Image (tube, rainbow, N blue to C red):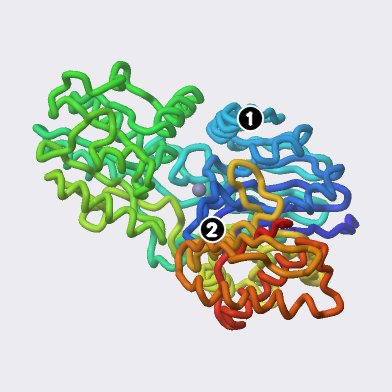
């Protein structure tokens, strides 16, 4: 009798307890693979950072066993970290469908890096050492999305990836429910299920509906110029806008770098059909009724095309009463204010603005509750772990799995850095691996947490630069302490305290009065004391020079 002797182990380097920087390690015996390698985008709590990427210490420690990286789809939260780690991963094959790999290639070209990229099609199975990975077509807000069945000697792990169940997708390619049901019937040991929209009741709306509503907007505004903003990566949305423009005799100007480049990549790999002659370089002499601007910036991003348009800073285009602006998106939580700022600015200029809260001009690419239930029913796993969500999403998804018959002892809500083996006997938790936020500001920051914390202090509490001259023989500060303060004023008190503290410190035995750094240390300590234990203090930069 064939007996499973090996365990399958999963380790979460990102994408759990958060929506962003998805990255999961799956291992069996000597073989290891990675599913996705994404970024998350910094919020106000990490000012000025370009991106946050997963910590890959664990991969580096096991690089000899890493057989490949498999990508579910081409969204930034699944592929965005690859260029930053391209050097470490040079020899590791990276697999994805054509649009996914096309987008990775474009990112690598931008950063002049190279990786071993391999294009597969939905339905393909790749062999990575002793692990086999099957790519299964799922619907999502972009083409080329796949669920993954990871076959190991320790059992099958089913990764849903980001998905929805759309019965009328605009490219006619539905989520392959038959294949998922077959895999489920053969026995899935562990399912990792995305949880983004678990809080939404019912089922998501088909992408097709957006097209119908957009067509109504084209008809109702035949004399006006149309400006449509959406995610550049939402290639089905872009497809519908291009087709409608063609049908209603409008030329399309692409506004925003990512819009242009994703349209290039998607049409090159056959996932976008651009009607001949529909895209033009500039607005030129086109009448409002003949023009459509397809822009990035549906999230109110400060440097995006839509934001610039709203301020009259884009290619000398003036927005006014001849314009109808359509935001074919909904604000990602946290972006509401920037989105509404842009909407306000556009209304002020006299434009008509149509956005999601009034019309069905956006649908989500993520499964709602009923779709998640269907997926769980088809896959019918022994063990279940909810991923791709904040804790509340994971919690609710876990409850659904339980209601659908997965035993509670077989459901785990994983946290970042956690590692589990699933065996016939149950789930075993291993010790945590290094994981967390790695910050990128141009380059990967060695001590990113400290930089972020400094920036937060700077933003909230200001900065204090103290310049002093010290007589290293006598152990005193000479003259006044020069103080440059930004963000608050307290200078007199600071000056007095610093002088007194140095005078006291010089008499203590461990103070080396010949060392300028000792004075600086005392100054720093004094300021902290001055601001009290419970209060946050400004960034303190003491500069002490020898007199
Ligand atoms: Zn996605
Ligand atoms: Zn995602």
| Viewer-proximal residue among 470 and 73 | 470
Q: Which of the 4 image quadrants contains residue 246?
A: top left
The answer to whether residue 181 of the structure is visible from this angle is no
Numbered disc in front, either 1 or 2: 2
Q: How many marks?
A: 2
Counting from the top left corner in percent of width and height, residue 267 is at 44, 25
User: Which corner quadrant holds the C terminus?
Assistant: bottom right
Determine the residue located farthest toward the top in the rendered image. Answer: 277
Counting from the top left corner in percent of width and height, residue 182 is at 62, 50
Q: Is residue 511 left or right of residue 240?
A: right
Counting from the top left corner in percent of width and height, residue 354 is at 20, 49
Q: Which of the 4 image quadrants contains residue 213?
A: top left
Say which residue appears at 41% left-offset and 40% top-offset.
Answer: 234
Q: Is residue 323 above or below residue 355?
A: above
Please tell me whether mark 1 sits on a helix, a strand or a loop: strand
Say which residue appears at 49% left-offset and 60% top-offset.
Answer: 196
Q: Is residue 164 left or right of residue 253?
A: right
Labelled pair 1, 2 in contact (Cβ < 8 Å): no
The answer to whether residue 100 of the structure is visible from this angle is yes
Mark-to-mark CA distance, 1 and 2: 35 Å
Q: Is residue 415 above or below residue 379?
A: below
Say which residue appears at 46% left-offset and 41% top-offset.
Answer: 142
Label 2 neighbourhood size at 10 Å, few (<14), some (14-19), many (20+)? many
Sequence-first tag of 1 and 2? 2
Say which residue appears at 31% left-offset and 53% top-offset.
Answer: 339
Q: Which of the 4 image quadrants contains residue 193?
A: bottom right
Q: Which residue is mark 2?
A: 46
Q: Which residue is mark 1?
A: 119
Q: Is residue 122 above or below residue 392?
A: above
């Amino acid at each position: 009798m064939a007996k499973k002797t090996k365990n399958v182990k999963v380790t979460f380097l990102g994408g759990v307890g958060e929506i962003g920087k998805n990255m999961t390690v799956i291992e069996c015996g000597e073989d290891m693979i990675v599913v996705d390698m994404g970024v998350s985008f910094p919020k106000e709590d990490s000012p000025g950072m370009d991106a946050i990427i997963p910590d890959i210490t664990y991969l580096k420690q096991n690089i000899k066993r890493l057989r490949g990286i498999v990508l579910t789809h081409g969204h930034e939260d699944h592929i965005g970290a690859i260029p930053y780690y391209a050097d470490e991963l040079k020899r590791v094959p990276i697999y994805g469908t054509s649009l996914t790999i096309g987008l990775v290639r474009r990112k690598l070209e931008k950063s002049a890096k190279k990786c071993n990229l391999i294009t597969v099609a939905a339905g393909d199975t790749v062999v990575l050492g002793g692990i086999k990975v099957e790519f299964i077509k799922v619907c999502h807000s972009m083409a080329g999305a796949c669920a993954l069945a990871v076959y190991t000697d320790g059992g099958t792990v089913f990764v849903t990836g980001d998905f929805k169940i759309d019965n009328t997708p605009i490219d006619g390619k539905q989520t392959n429910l038959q294949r998922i049901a077959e895999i489920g019937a053969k026995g899935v040991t562990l399912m990792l299920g995305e949880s983004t929209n678990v809080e939404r009741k019912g089922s998501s709306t088909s992408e097709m509906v957006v097209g119908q509503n957009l067509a109504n907007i084209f008809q109702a505004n035949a004399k006006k110029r149309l400006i449509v903003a959406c995610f550049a990566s939402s290639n089905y949305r872009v497809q519908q806008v291009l087709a409608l423009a063609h049908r209603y005799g409008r030329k399309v100007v692409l506004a925003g770098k990512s819009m242009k480049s994703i349209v290039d990549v998607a049409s090159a790999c056959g996932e976008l059909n651009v009607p001949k002659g529909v895209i033009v370089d500039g607005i030129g002499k086109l009448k409002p009724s003949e023009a459509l601007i397809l822009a990035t910036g549906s999230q109110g991003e400060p440097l995006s095309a839509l934001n610039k348009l709203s301020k009259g800073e884009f290619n000398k285009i003036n927005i006014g009463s001849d314009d109808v602006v359509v935001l074919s998106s909904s604000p990602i939580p946290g972006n509401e204010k920037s989105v509404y700022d842009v909407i306000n600015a556009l209304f002020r200029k006299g434009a008509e603005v149509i956005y999601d809260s009034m019309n069905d001009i956006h649908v989500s690419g993520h499964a709602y509750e009923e779709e998640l239930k269907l997926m769980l029913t088809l896959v019918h796993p022994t063990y279940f772990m909810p991923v791709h969500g904040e804790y509340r999403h994971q919690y609710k998804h876990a409850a659904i799995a339980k209601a659908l018959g997965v035993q509670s002892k077989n459901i785990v809500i994983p946290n970042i850095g956690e590692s589990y083996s699933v065996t016939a006997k149950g789930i075993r938790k291993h010790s945590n691996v290094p994981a967390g936020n790695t910050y990128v500001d141009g380059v990967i920051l060695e001590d990113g947490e400290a930089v972020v914390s400094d920036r937060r202090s700077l933003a909230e509490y200001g900065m204090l630069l103290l310049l002093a001259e010290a007589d290293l023989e006598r152990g005193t500060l000479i003259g006044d302490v020069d103080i440059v303060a930004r963000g608050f004023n307290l200078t007199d008190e600071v000056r007095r305290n610093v002088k007194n503290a140095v005078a006291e410190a010089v008499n203590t035995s461990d103070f080396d009065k010949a060392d300028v750094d000792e004075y600086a240390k005392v100054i720093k300590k004094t300021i902290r004391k001055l601001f009290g234990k419970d209060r946050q203090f400004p960034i303190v930069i003491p500069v002490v020079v020898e007199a």
